[in-house]
Amino acid sequence: MASPILIVEDDPFHLKFIEDQFSDDAFAEYRLECFESGDLAHDWLRQNKPNRAIIDLNLPGKNGVEVATRVWQKDPSASVVFWSNFSDPAYVRAIAKIVPEHGNFGYILKTMAAEKLQRSLKGVLFDGLRIIDSEVQGFINRRNARRAQLNPVEIEVLNLIALGITDRAISAIIGTSQRTIQATATSIFDKLGGDEEMTDTLNKRSRLVALALMEGEINRDTLLEHETRRSVFAKSGK
């Protein structure tokens, strides 16, 4: 039986573009299992264990990171290509957190030319190479050259601030003082390049969120992840 290659892509144009990369006879021993949502792919993964996958990051239902997590739960040695419109560091950071020790991944933007795309897909899926799109890597390098990276606590505080949560509530969620939360917010502001003079035309917390969005440090998926944690904490009554 032909080995499956999982493809999860909700845009028909991009799905066809990916499928065309496997039209060569060299891939005859593989079958493409294509799904248009993260939920459908997740259902298929209940009974199947692909060793190779190409996953869009921004999907209806479960997002690409959640689908990839399930792929690696089924087979920690699987190779996964993340196929995306976004070069945000937040996405790269989310992926790095879930890659198992023996797993491999690539991060490829949808703007990549067909010839280069096919080489990259082969490199990740069949040769075990870790390939990060040059535009994504360049974005990360430029960001790192400008400022220090945020640490895990700062990332959590940043997302909770962006959700509109008060310092008092954040301190309870994280388990530290309000003064520490305020100091952490100032540290984040400085790292994001918020060195402009604060005047009565700027709100510091709102400006912090704006800088984080412009720098790609937070996005819809990171906010949903922290919104879930906030909801669980609120229901606990602590």
Image (cartoon, grey):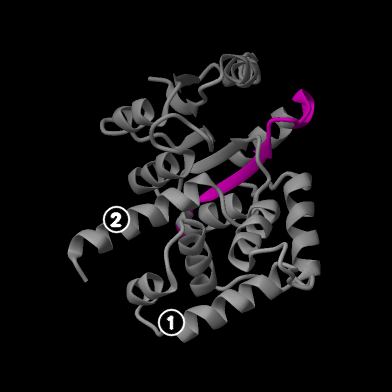
What separation in Å lies between label 2 and label 1 (alpha carbons)?
20 Å
Query: Which image quarter holds the N terminus?
Result: top left
* Disc 2 + disc 1, Cβ < 8 Å: no
- Kindly identify the residue that appears in the image at 44 percent across and 29 percent down: 60
Q: Is residue 150 left or right of residue 41?
A: right
Numbered circle sitting on residue 231: 2
Q: What kind of residue is marked 1?
A: Gln
Highlighted magenta segment, given as a residue range: 100-116
Q: Does the segment drawn in magenta span residue 112? A: yes
Q: Is residue 57 left or right of residue 123?
A: left
Q: Is 1 rendered above or below residue 55? A: above
Q: Name the residue under label 1.
A: 178
Residue 150 image position (x, y, % from top left):
61, 70
At mark 1, the secondary structure is helix
- Kindly identify the residue that appears in the image at 48 percent across and 39 percent down: 64
Q: What kind of residue is marked 2?
A: Ser
- Kindly identify the residue that appears in the image at 48 percent across and 54 percent down: 99
Q: Which of 136 and 185 is in front in this view?
A: 185
Residue 124 image position (x, y, % from top left):
62, 41
Q: Is residue 143 left or right of residue 92?
A: right
Numbered circle sitting on residue 57: none
At mark 2, the secondary structure is helix
Q: Is 201 rendered above or below residue 8? A: below
Q: Nearer the viewer, mark 2 or mark 1?
A: 1
Residue 233 image position (x, y, % from top left):
27, 63
Q: Which of 207 and 63 is in front in this view?
A: 207
Residue 221 image position (x, y, % from top left):
48, 46
Q: In this view, does 38 lie to the left or right of 30?
A: left
Q: For label 2, count other residues whose C-alpha is less than 10 Å away and answer few (under 14), some (14-19) or many (20+).
A: few
Q: For label 1, count other residues whose C-alpha is less than 10 Å away and answer few (under 14), some (14-19) or many (20+).
A: some
Q: Sequence order check: which comes first, mark 2 or mark 1?
A: 1
Query: Which image quarter holds the C terminus?
Result: bottom left
